[in-house]
Structures are given as structure tokens and as C-alpha cells.
Image (cartoon, coloured by chain):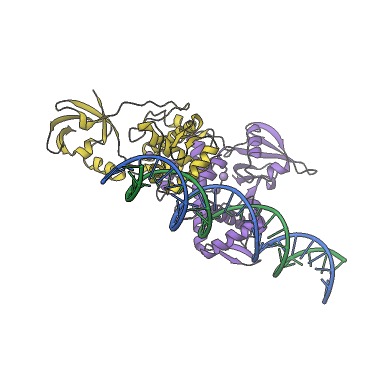
Chain colours: A yellow, B purple, C blue, D green
Amino acid sequence: MLSQTEENYLKAIYTLGLSNSKSVNTTLIAQKLKTKPSSVTDMIQKLAEKELVNYEKYKGVFLTFNGKKIAIEIVRKHRLWEVFLTNKLHYNWDEVHEIAEQLEHIKSDTLVGRLEAFLEFPKHDPHGDPIPDEHGNIAHHKKIMLSSIEPNRSCIVIGVKDSTSSFLKFLDKANIQLGRTVKVIAKEEFDNSIIIENNNSLISISNQISKNLFVKNI
Amino acid sequence: MLSQTEENYLKAIYTLGLSNSKSVNTTLIAQKLKTKPSSVTDMIQKLAEKELVNYEKYKGVFLTFNGKKIAIEIVRKHRLWEVFLTNKLHYNWDEVHEIAEQLEHIKSDTLVGRLEAFLEFPKHDPHGDPIPDEHGNIAHHKKIMLSSIEPNRSCIVIGVKDSTSSFLKFLDKANIQLGRTVKVIAKEEFDNSIIIENNNSLISISNQISKNLFVKNI
DNA sequence: ATAAAAATTTAGATAAATCTAAAAAAGTTT
DNA sequence: AAACTTTTTTAGATTTATCTAAATTTTTAT
Ligand SMILES: [Mn+2]
Ligand SMILES: [Mn+2]
Ligand SMILES: [Mn+2]
Ligand SMILES: [Mn+2]
């Protein structure tokens, strides 16, 4: 049985490795987990012992088949609990991550599956991230950023890249929600800000915002 | 912030102290928590430092006002999660305790309250134990055992004393559920077994069983 | 009241997870 | 290529929770 700490390391290595798919370096993991590189080295060596990661000194780590399976299981639990917290307990999407960080570590052979059925098999968490199925299959949608949409085109907001509380609260204030259809009206070359039509009103959003919103074409 | 271990000790001291209300001794706590008396002493001294228990060497411990408040909060969380697991995720009442042992330690200022509202403010857990309210008030009903009911009287099963999985499974098999009205038909002096009418059929149950069923008079 | 038994505490050891500081390796600049 | 910088690992210390074995206190029995 893995400790919460070990599970958190696996999840961190998984999410950090997603973009580059190469091995993940010590410092990055330390940053992500708010710990020291020396602690990361210790834990990595322990996980390598258990054959959950492949580790070569000074070269970083990547997950083994088994390690990846476990990591995805944690991600699955995390996201399903987030759905529970928003859909059933009516939490706002900026409040659920912390609690899900704890709930994802509850150990039970049957709990996730029951939870998933209770929630009626959601496909995405409140931030638009896909929920792995019970076999660990995960639907990666291609990530189009709102900032890359040409003027005069409409699209649907389907996810956030940054899911810090502050960004999510900003989106609430701007009345931007997942599932919303928005139309890019104009693009300002100077600072790459754009004007969009959202919910029948025009608003200007900075590049920093539009770079952190995933959309799909209609 | 208390560790899970500290919380478990407080809860154990609380539940063990309920019947006698005097101080709880080291060995009993060790038994309950499946640990060694020396470990209990260590933890007790730590909790005494934090003023969560009153401790006198060789005399046992009892909870301070603050310690009791925390203990009841854990009990509240445990029982609400058990209701969630049975009512929402359709677990059987013999399967929920272990998972609730984990869920009771999730830290959040708002979660218990939201959960309680979602469950529509249940008054009892699946085993008939009362759920403390948000202020720590707890409705102690007087505990009448089925074994003490005279022949020819009817009563309602409202709780179990023993909530081990094996006892609960036995009750399932015998079709005895909480809320059921049962009538004591006859009592066998020899072994104190009784014959009851339950769900329109007569069954004989041993004293060991009837001593572990709480009832209320109609 | 003394002796024996049981309960409890203390002392010292161990394992997990973390840290700081120092050493070693890898990467970058001149 | 040598010097400098950054990254990573190692060594050793710390904290928490646990254990075993020994010492101490309390309780029970004679
Ligand atoms: Mn999250
Ligand atoms: Mn976590
Ligand atoms: Mn329980
Ligand atoms: Mn517990």
C-alpha cells in the first residue's frame, strides 16, 4: 500500500511528464511538490526500488507501466471527487482542488467506481480536464487556446489551463463559464488582447487570459 | 492542525469514556487502537501538552473541553460519511465503517456542513448512532436492549451495539433492519433466547444477538 | 503488611519523511 | 579546455510515530 506522499510523487511525475513525455527532472518535481530536491531524490530512489519509476542518476525519472497506472488512478479519483464537490455539494470550481487533494488518497477497491456511477459517469472535471475511465484510458482532446482563434470565429470554452483560484475567480467575474460559446470580435496587435462577445456582451481580455482558456471549434 | 493519529486517539478516548465517564486507562486505548501501551503513553503526553486531555501519571486520561469538541467533530464526520456511503453510493451498512475511518480525517472548514445539508440533515448513521449537530450537541437516546423486552410487547429496532461486519451480515440474513417493528413472542429461560415476530414470520434469536440490538418502545 | 501480579511509564531503537550543508556531476560560458 | 554555474546526489540531522525491554507504580492476593 502506497503512502499519500508516494501517491503525490507519482501524480506529480505523471502530470509533469505529460507535455514533454521525456523524463522529469528533480528540481521540477521539488517545485511542484513544494519540497527540496534532496527529498525528491530520496523518494525517487524509493519509488525506483518499487519499480514504479525508471530512474537514472542525474538523468531524471519517468513512470513505469505500473507507476503510470497508479498515477492515472489518482488523477481519476481527484477529478471525480471534484465533480462531486461541485455538482452535489455546490462548491464553486475554485474551491474544490484542495479538498480533492485529500479525497484522492482514500483507499477502497470499490469507492471510485461507485462514486463515478453516482455522478453518472462524467467525462470531465469542473475545469474541463478529462476523467480517466476505470481502465486508465483517458480522452486527450487537442488543446486549442482561445488566443489562437482568428477574429470573427466562434468557439466553445471547454477548459482552463491555469486553475488557480485567482484565475477562476476572475473568470467568474467576467462571466466566462465552461460550455459558453464566445466569438472573437477583434484582436489588438500591440498586446495581443482580444475583444470577445460573451453572453451577449463585449469584453476585452488580455493575452494572459486567452492563453489560459481552452476552446473547441464549432 | 492535528494528525490523523492524534484525531484517532481523541475519538478513541471519547468513545471509551462514554459509558463510565471516568478517566480511560492506557491498556484500553491501546487495545482499541491496536497499538502498544507505551505508544499510547507517548501520544497521551503529547495530547496533554496540547491541552486536549487531562492526564495524571498512572491514573489514565479524560478529554478537556477542547479535546471533547474535536472528538465529537470527528464522530460527526464519520457518521455523516457513513450515511453518504449507504444512502448515496448504496453501500451495505456492513461495508461503510472502514471507508468512513478514512473520510473522517478530511480537513475542510465547510465540507461537513455541506455534506450534512446534501444528506438532508440525517439524525442517525446507518447503525442507528446519533449524529452530533454542528455545535457538537448529540442526542443520546436511552439504550434499551431487545433482550430486556417482555414477551408480548412490540418495539422498534433502532440501533446495533455491535457493528462488526459479521453481526450486520447476520442481521441481513435474518432480515432484521433498523426501523422494523418486532414483537417478542416468547422467552426461553434456559439460554435467554427469544422468539420474535419480524416481518410476519417467527424467528428465534440468541441472547447474544438480542443483547446487541437497541430498540424503542412503541 | 508483604509479596506477587498487572498496569503503566521510561529508555532506547527503528522507520518514514523531511531538512541543511557539502560533495559530485552535468551544463554553460569564455 | 578551463572556469564557472546549475543541478543533482550524498551525508548527516530532525521530527513523528511506532516498537521492545526494562523500570516503576498501582492493584490484588495472601
Ligand atoms: Mn484539481
Ligand atoms: Mn494529493
Ligand atoms: Mn463506523
Ligand atoms: Mn479514523
Q: In which quarter of the image is residue D7?
A: top left
Q: Please tell me which residue is depicted at 13% across the width and 33% down the height of the picture.
A: A187
Q: Is residue B139 visible?
A: no
Q: Which percent across, then down, holds residue A89?
A: 39, 40
Q: Quadrant of residue A143?
A: top left
Give the percent coordinates (x, y) of residue B68.
52, 59
In front here: B82 or B119?
Answer: B82
Frontmost residue, B108 versus B186? B108
The quarter of the rendered structure image containing the C terminus of chain A is top left
The residue sitting at 66% across, 38% down in the picture is B166
Q: In this view, does A2 lie to the left or right of A152?
A: right
Q: Judge left or right: residue B200 versus residue A125.
A: right
- On the image, the x and y values in percent for residue A179 come to 27, 30
From the top left corner, tell me how far across and down residue C19 is, in percent.
44, 54
Q: Residue furthest top?
A: A218
Apparent side of residue B138 relative to residue B212 in the rendered image (left or right): left
**Image: A179 above or below B218:** above
State the count of labels. Answer: 0
Which sits in the foreground, B24 or B92? B24
- Please give the name of the residue rendered at 58% of the width and 39% of the height, measured from the top-left corner: B178
Does residue A17 show up? yes
In the picture, the quarter occupied by the N terminus of chain A is top right
